[in-house]
Image (cartoon, rainbow, N blue to C red):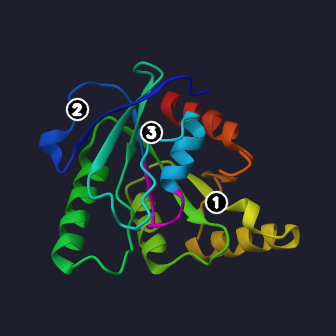
Amino acid sequence: MIKQAVFIKSAADRSGWIEDDIPEICFVGRSNVGKSSFINSIANQNKIAKVANTPGKTRLLNFFDINKGYFRIVDAPGYGYAKINIKMKIKFGEMMEDYLMNRDNLKGVCMLVDLRHKPTGDDKAMYDFLKQCEIPVLMIGTKLDKLKRNEISKNEKLIKETLNFYEQDAFLKVSNLNKTNIQDAWVEFVKIIEN
């Protein structure tokens, strides 16, 4: 489990990447999916990742050290936020493509989707891109506590069908609010890092 999580730095491009061989897991998801809340839940800290009132606030890759160099979480900007201008979207796309395709430290991606909704075109494009690059994915379905019991498996099925989900990727349904399955994420992180 995560015993220690410390913010190290932010980077707008590869000039800000950290030069070492510590493994990294990149966290991606659309704006407002609950990514910062999930990072805070797994790190067991309230404010390690800033939860913005306005979606689309993160514009940089944020690097967090986990358990004194065991691995790093790299928190990527949320995608799909409508109010961002085209120039910024292009810059974001270039930054993400460079990191995901060329970062030797990258071991896998933790992709978050909202269990309440069908994945968006942006979600599908991101997942397709990750599969094309043969990057291992841990899919996290957030906001489990907001679903009725009879909706859970139906919604999971819809998400998997929409994304054309690869069964070798892990899929976890979590609630940041009541910490459901939060510890299971750690098991999956270890699998990614040590593969």
What secondary structure predominates along the stretch shown in magenta?
loop
Mark 3 against mark 2, which lies toward the viewer?
Answer: 3
Residue receiving disc 2: 18
- Nearer the observer, 25 or 182: 182
Q: Is residue 5 above or below residue 137?
A: above
Q: Earlier in the sequence, mark 1 or mark 2?
A: 2
Q: Residue at x 49, y 31 (%)?
A: 193
Q: Residue at x 28, y 51 (%)?
A: 101
Label 3: which secondary element? loop
The local crowd at label 1, few if under 14, some if 14 to 19, many if 20 or more residues have their Cα within 10 Å, is: many
Residue 114, image x, y percentages:
60, 67
Mark 1 against mark 3, which lies toward the viewer?
Answer: 3
Q: Earlier in the sequence, mark 3 or mark 2?
A: 2
Residue receiving disc 3: 48
- Nearer the observer, 50 or 181: 50
Amino acid on which disc 3 is placed: Ile
Residue 49, image x, y percentages:
43, 45
Q: Is residue 18 above or below residue 60?
A: above
